[in-house]
Every structure is written in C-alpha cells, then in structure tokens.
Image: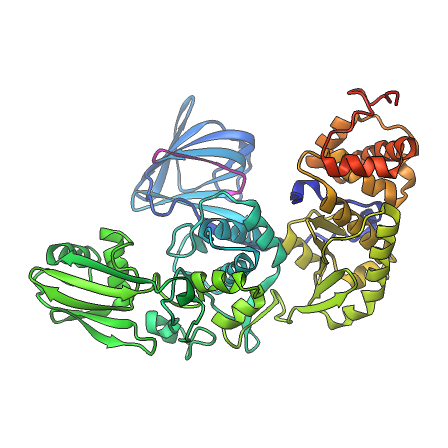
Amino acid sequence: MRRTLAALCLVAACAHLPCQSAPRGTIRVGLWTLWHDRQVSVTPVHGATLRLCAACPARPLPSIEIHAQGAALLWSEKGGNHTAQELLLGGNSRLTAHGESLQLAYPLWITAQGGALVMAATLPVERYVELAVAAESGAADSPESRKALAVTARSFALDRTHGHAGFDVCDSTHCQWVRWRTTPDAHAATLATAGESLWFHGRRTAAYFHQNCGGRTAAATEVWPEHKAQGRTDSGPLVSRTDNYCPRVSSGEWSATLSRAELTSALAAAGLAAPGWKSLSIARRGDSGRATMVQAGSTQMAAESFRLAVGRSLGWNRIRSNWFEVAAEGESFLFHGRGSGHGVGLCQTGAAEMASEGRGYREILAQYFPGAIAAEESTGAAWLNMSGQGFRLDTSEAADDAYMPILAGALAEAERRSGLASRAAFTVRAYRSTPAFRDATLAPGWVAAFTEGNMIAAQPLRVLAARKLLADVMRHEFLHALVEEQATASTPLWLREGLVEAWSGDARRLQKPALTPEQASQKLAHAGSEAESEMAHAAAGWYAAQLLERFGRAKVLEWLRSGVPVAAFGSDGNERSR
C-alpha cells in the first residue's frame, strides 16, 4: 500500500537528529509555455501571497487579473489598476487562462516579454521529475521502465540549461512534457530512484528519451550538431546503437503524404526555406541511417529542424522521426520512415519491453546509455546493492556494509514483535548526507527515515549509528513496511500507524490521549509541525495498544488485513464493550 509523504513515519528518536537548514534542490519550470498567454486570472486558495519584487514585502494575495503589455504587467484588483515589471506569488493559488484552470502550490514568478506572459514555477527537482514521469510514461510501462524514465528525466533536468532565459526547463515537449498532475506510479518510480542521475567518466551526462527508435538509436551529434559547438566533442553515452527490444513490440514504420504547399508554408513559417523551391531530398545521413540534413531546392537545413517545423505546422503525427525516405509524386511528397521521436537515448518502447522481460531499470539504462552509471546525484558515487535476509540495501557508501547485521536484526525483531513475516524483500535506501536525503525525498527535517510501500528511505546510516539510533529507527521502519504490506486502502490510518507505535514500545502511550481515533488520523495525514505529529502518533499508539490488550494480536491483525474499520472505540474515543 502506498503511503503519501503527508503521512511520514516519525519516531521519538527523530527529534534528536540535526535539523540543519540546507537549501533544497529546486528547478524553475516554465508554465503553459506553448500558449503564450496575454492574460491570466489568479485566485487565492490557501496562504497565498503577492510581492511586487524579490525584496518587496509580501501581502495577502487578492483575486487579480494580470495582463501583458510589451515588457510590463498590468494587473487589476478591486479598487484600482496597477503596473509592475514582475509579480511573485507564494502559497496556494488558482490560475485560469486559455480555458484551463490550475491550482498551484509552488512559488510563481510572472513577467512579460513581447506582449506575452512569462510564468515560472519553482519546484523541488524531485517533484518536477515526478510530474515529467507522470506525463511522459505510457500504458506499456511497468515499475522498472518508469524508474529508468525517472533517472533519465532527472539527468536531463540537471544537465546544463535548455535554451530558456526565464526558467530552466519548460513544460512542453521542447524539454519534457509536464501536465501539472501526478500519478501513484510516477511517484513510486521517482521516489525509488531519488538522488540518482546518469554519470559518464566522472561527470553528470546529458540524457534524453523518445518514443520508438525503430530498431536503432541515434547519436546526439546526428540530431543536434550544437552538442559539438557546446564543447561536447563526442556523444558520450548518447551513441547510435542497435536496439533488439524495440522491434519486438513494433517496427515503428510510418508513411505520410504532404503537399508541396503544406511543406512550403511550414518551412517558411519556421524561417528555414523561402517559397519557390521545387525539389526535396536527403542531403546527408548519420551512422544510424537517419537523415541529418534535408535539402529543399538549393537550401539545406538540419533534418531535426525540418521535422520540428512540419510538426508545429501540420501535426506531430506526420513526420514522426528523421529516419525516412522521401520521393516526389506530382505536387506532393511521399515519406516512408520508421521510429517516433528524435531517437537519442532511452527508447521508451524498448525500455517497456525490457522491463516486461524482467530486466531492472539499471540494465535498461545500460542498454541505452552505454558506459554511463546511475550515480549519487551530487558526488557521482555509484549506487551499490547489498542483499540481506528479507531486505536489500541501496547505498552509495561501501562502508555501509558494516551495518547489514544491524538491519537484519531490526527486521527479525520487527517480525517477532508483530507476528508478521515479509512477503517480499524490502528495500532500504540510505542517502549519503542529510541534505541529500531531504532534497531527494522532500521529507521534513525531523524525519530520520520513512516508509512507502516496501521501500524505506533513510538518512545516512553512519549518522544514525553514531547517535545510537540505527537499530531503533530501522526496527520502526520495518514494522511500518510489514504493516503496510498487510493493510488495505480502507484500513484506518490511526490503526496502521498505531500498531507500529505500540510494537515499538514507546512509553508515551501510557496516558489516554485527548485526540479521538478519527482526529488522530486527520493529524497524522496533515500534521503542521513535529509536535503535532508526535501527539497524533502517540494517540494512535495508545488506541492500538488498547486493542491489542483487549482483543489480542490475532484479532487486531484480522482487522488490519480485512480493511474493516475497528469499532472498539466510539467517535469520542471512549471504549465500547466487547
């Protein structure tokens, strides 16, 4: 069962961990970049604020209309009209433009350029990766192929800039598509790979993905000659390579007929070729067989520029890739090709097929980025897998091998106390530093570790061990993993969290709490502070301990597995008779 980050595991020992104030890894994402909106309506939702500049004081955000006029912003609210060069929104607000409405909980910077609004939201990198995976993954994907996509999307986002002046990446397919909503599958894939990016020869490397390679990927320099101009003297891991997996699903063949008039209009609109040309041919091909240069009359242009120009004007389903032949037929041109997309890097069709055959995401990455490794995001240290009895440790520190016996003992003790046995191996993912843990998981500062499904994310094991917390914290998290493995969607949150508290043996539960079970569930899901969260966990633990004492472990585990709400307490938290 998936647990949200709003219901993180908190233990008493976590309060004693260092709460260093480290800046989170963030990325600026251009919002609605394809629309070039000239106006947007903004409505406050919760805690929304407005500032007129970065150094200006914040005030409550009213409902406003924002218009672009040249390089200035005109905005109106009840009581008057105003002009500004920039507006900064904080808190939670709703934006409405071009018939679309979006509730946004990230800081938003708004300026104007050429009479159009430029809007950039600042997100944690991991939240951006999650949104990209949710938008870009397809029905054929499974957990391992989504993990490979998450590492690729993260590496793309962190590798240099992507040609935008007002933000780092846009939310269109020019960078990576973002629909501003997530899915449980995308969240799981992002969290399972959090902190991993692709490195090549000691440096973080560029990474790209596409839909279908047609049986062979393309080198980056075939598609984007500017890679060489940027000092990238070779393609690194972005080389042309045979893909035996993609053709097992689809040959990727396609054909299209486009009139000379359609192509003339598309190329003129993109500034690639003036009207009047008569012939169209492939001027040059790359090692993969794809066209690298196209010639219209006497004018040559990059094949990728040709493809994008046609796509923007006539639709992306016409010229689907650069791997094509073209022949004239009267006043039209017949195209026949294979593959979909630019062909560089991860082939999503092939990755999904590899995953369906039992390949792990790192094997998938090795296929499409030969020579690159999935490494710790900030240092480039390789992630290591260490196997234990009933669990696996993912870490970038080889010295963590010394803690394997402690983890094994913690799992054995958790199984003894709960009477539960794991159905499948759990994964413990230990981060290299506290800031890395926070940036990767977005967990608040008082959390030592937390559990989602069968994965446990933890602060550095050496930090927990030095503070003599490792055994207690890991036993607590293994208890969570065991409970979540048995629980159903209808199992009350207070019971799931409370059983872990009760089996952890915390003395805080000796006094009857002020919170009812239902109130405890609400606080567990939406705790506003460490103190509030600890109070809710203590209340849940007290109620669970009472159930275990009165009804016995077997009966309580039956309730846990069945998902039937426990009726042993009234709505006021008072005990009912048996």
Q: Is residue 396 magenta?
A: no
Q: Is residue 109 left or right of residue 13?
A: left
Q: Which residues are magenta?
A: 98-107
Is residue 202 visible in the rendered structure shown here? yes
* 261 shown above or below 303: above
**Front residue of this view, candidates 331 and 64:** 331
**Front residue of this view, candidates 70 and 228:** 228
Is residue 469 visible in the rendered structure shown here? no
Q: Position of residue 458 (x, y in %)?
A: 73, 56
What residue sits 70% from the left and 52% below the top? 454
Q: Position of residue 53 (x, y in %)?
A: 48, 42
Q: Quadrant of residue 98?
A: top left
Q: Quadrant of the C terminus?
A: top right
- Which color scheme is applied? rainbow
Q: Quadrant of the N terminus?
A: top right
Labels in figure, total: 0
What residue sits 18% from the left and 67% below the top? 326
**Front residue of this view, candidates 94 and 368:** 368
Q: Is residue 172 left or right of residue 184?
A: left
Q: Is residue 258 left or right of residue 535?
A: left
Q: Is residue 129 left or right of residue 484?
A: left
Q: Position of residue 329 (x, y in %)?
A: 9, 63
Q: Position of residue 357 (x, y in %)?
A: 54, 64
* 170 shown above or below 198: above
Q: Is residue 104 magenta?
A: yes
**Front residue of this view, candidates 193 and 242:** 242
